[in-house]
Amino acid sequence: MFLIIGALVVIGVIYLLLKRHESRMVLIAAGILMCCIAGNPMASLDAFAKSMTNAGLITSVCSCMGFAWCMKYTGCDKHLVVAIGKVLKKWAFCSFPALRWQPLLLILLSPVLQAAVLR
């Protein structure tokens, strides 16, 4: 019985994700729903609390927040968006593939950007 209900919840999650609902909300709600169906509603919240107290996660989140604040404070975030926008305007014929690769480009360039900000 639980297997059928779990499969229905997974199908519902896939449907909602395909309809472009907020992915984090859908996944968290599905996890809480599955835990409630299993009879242990606090299991999902306990797992969330356990993962949030992981030291590696805290340092990662803090450094990302610090880098984002530094980028916003110095105005580099606006300059980066303008620079990428200029490149995309010149290369309009490949703008859709470029938009797909833009997050990867930003991830690859983040050490360079951090070094430029910290200088």
Image (cartoon, rainbow, N blue to C red):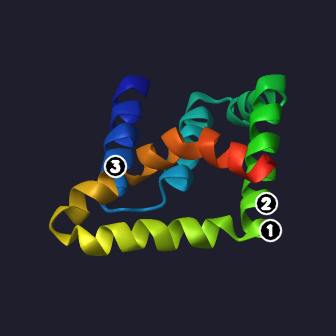
Judging by the rendered image, the residue that carries numbered circle 2 is 69
SS type, badge 2: helix
**Residue 18 seen in the figure:** no
Crowding around mark 2 (Cα neighbors within 10 Å: few <14, some 14 to 19, many 20+) is: few
Q: Looking at this view, name the residue that lies furthest to the left.
A: 93
| Callout 1: SS | helix
Residue furthest to the front:
119
Task: Tell me: 104 left or right of 65.
Answer: left
Q: Are marks 1 and 2 in contact (CB under 8 Å)?
A: yes
Q: Which residue is mark 3?
A: 101
Distance of label 2 from label 3 (alpha carbons): 24 Å
The residue that appears at 34% across and 49% down in the rendered structure is: 101
* Residue 5 position (above or below residue 19): above
Which residue shows up at 56% across the image and 38% down it? 31
**Viewer-proximal residue, 10 or 114?**
114
Q: Quadrant of residue 3?
A: top left
